[in-house]
Amino acid sequence: MGLSQAFEGWYMNKNEMAEKIADQIDLTKADASRAIDALFGTIASELSAGGEVSIAGFGKFETRTRNARTGRNPQTGAEISIPARRVAAFKAAKALKDQVE
């Protein structure tokens, strides 16, 4: 059991992911970590440029626009204006959804 599993429930951090990938495809942990960095860096760059990344059988990373809205300051209760912004989003493919069930 990894350290992350002993605490906040079941999740995997980057180091644990690098270990699993290194074991599965006979890489060093450092090479697997660089591959993970490259993967996520590529996805982030594409999303920053306004594109999307679709991985068959896994899902699609895309950006969505959140509309401007009015919120409340939790300390004072005063209304505040929250501007519109782009956010990263992920939509799981059917194959991933089926595997998780």
Image (spheres, rainbow, N blue to C red):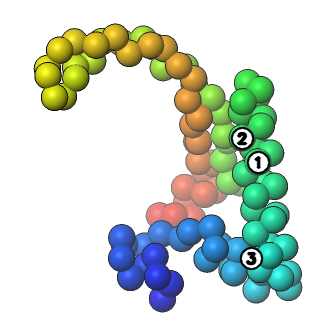
Q: Would you call the spot at circle 2 few (<14 residues within 10 Å), some (14-19), or many (20 or more)? A: some
Q: Quadrant of residue 97?
A: bottom right
Would residue 97 appear left or right of 50 to someone viewing this image?
left
Q: What whole-number distance in Å separates the C-alpha atoms at marks 2 and 3?
A: 21 Å
Asked if 23 appears above or below 55 in the picture, the reply is below
Asked if 12 appears above or below 20 in the picture, the reply is above
Asked if 19 appears above or below 95 in the picture, the reply is below
Q: Secondary structure at mark 3?
A: helix
**Looking at the image, is mark 3 or mark 1 nearer the viewer?**
1
Say which residue appears at 55% left-offset and 29% top-offset.
87
Would residue 69 appear left or right of 73 to someone viewing this image?
right
Amino acid identity at mark 2: Ala
Give the percent coordinates (x, y) of residue 69: 36, 12
Q: Quadrant of residue 54?
A: top right
- For the image shown, how many numbered marks are present on the structure? 3
- The residue beneath circle 1 is 41
Q: Earlier in the sequence, mark 2 or mark 3?
A: 3
- The residue beneath circle 3 is 21
Q: What whole-number distance in Å separates the C-alpha atoms at marks 3 and 1?
A: 17 Å
- The residue beneath circle 2 is 44
